[in-house]
Image (cartoon, grey):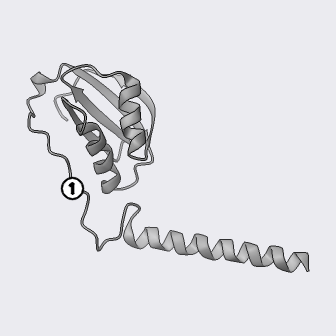
Amino acid sequence: MSTAIICTVLIVIAIIGIKSYTKKLTSGCCGSSSQPSVKKIKVKDKDKSHYPYTRILKVDGMSCGNCASHVENALNSLEGVWAQADLEKGEALVRMKQEYENNELKQAVKDAGYVVYKIEESPVCSNR
């Protein structure tokens, strides 16, 4: 009897896992394909010389373009910040007019549902 219950529970878990996986494959991780993509917060000042402080945040959990937009929006909502997330590298380049503490940047990303596992000081590259 207990073996039948255990088998039933395992089958239910497998079915839920398969449904979740197929949904992710068809609709992406951050919403269905019928929903519009995340609207980005636009940064008005895109003059790189106005941003003397930079960091590269290594972000875990970004798996699609909407994820990258969520991370960018979380950082760009901070005053004087211009962030650009790179999905392929799993990182975000953060330019700042005034210096923010690393914990503040981590918290902004955490509030968006992602994890910063490393922060690097970085000179701004001209190719970004």
Mark 1 crowdedness (10 Å alpha carbons): few <14, some 14-19, many ≥20? few
Q: Is residue 8 left or right of residue 3?
A: left
Foreground of the two, 69 or 112: 112
Quarter of the image where one finds residue 77: top left
Q: Where is the C terminus found, in terms of image quarters?
A: top left
Q: How many callouts does the rendering have?
A: 1
Is residue 31 positioned above or below 88 on the image? below
Name which residue lies at 23% across and 38% down: 76
Q: Measuring from the top left, give residue 119's x and y in whole percent.
A: 40, 27
Residue drawn at x 59%, y 70% as measured from the top left: 17
Tag 1, which secondary structure?
loop
Which of the pair 25/125 is nearer the observer? 25
Q: Looking at the picture, does residue 115 appear above or below residue 53?
A: below
Residue 126 sits in quarter = top left
**Residue type of the residue flagged with mark 1:** Lys
Residue at the spot 30% in from the left edge and 55% down from the top edge:
65
Classify 120 as above or below 86: above
* Image position, residue 105 (x, y; %): 35, 30
Q: Residue at x 25, y 62 (%)?
A: 37
**Tag 1 residue:** 39
Q: Which image quadrant is residue 124 in?
A: top left
Q: Residue furthest right?
A: 1
**Drawn side of residue 81 relative to residue 65, left or right:** left
Residue 122: x percent and y percent? 30, 22
- Residues 99 and 52: in front is 99
Measured as percent of width and height from the top left, residue 107 is found at 40, 34
| Quadrant holding the N terminus | bottom right
65 relative position to 96: left or right: right
> Is 93 left or right of 63, judged from the image as shown?
left
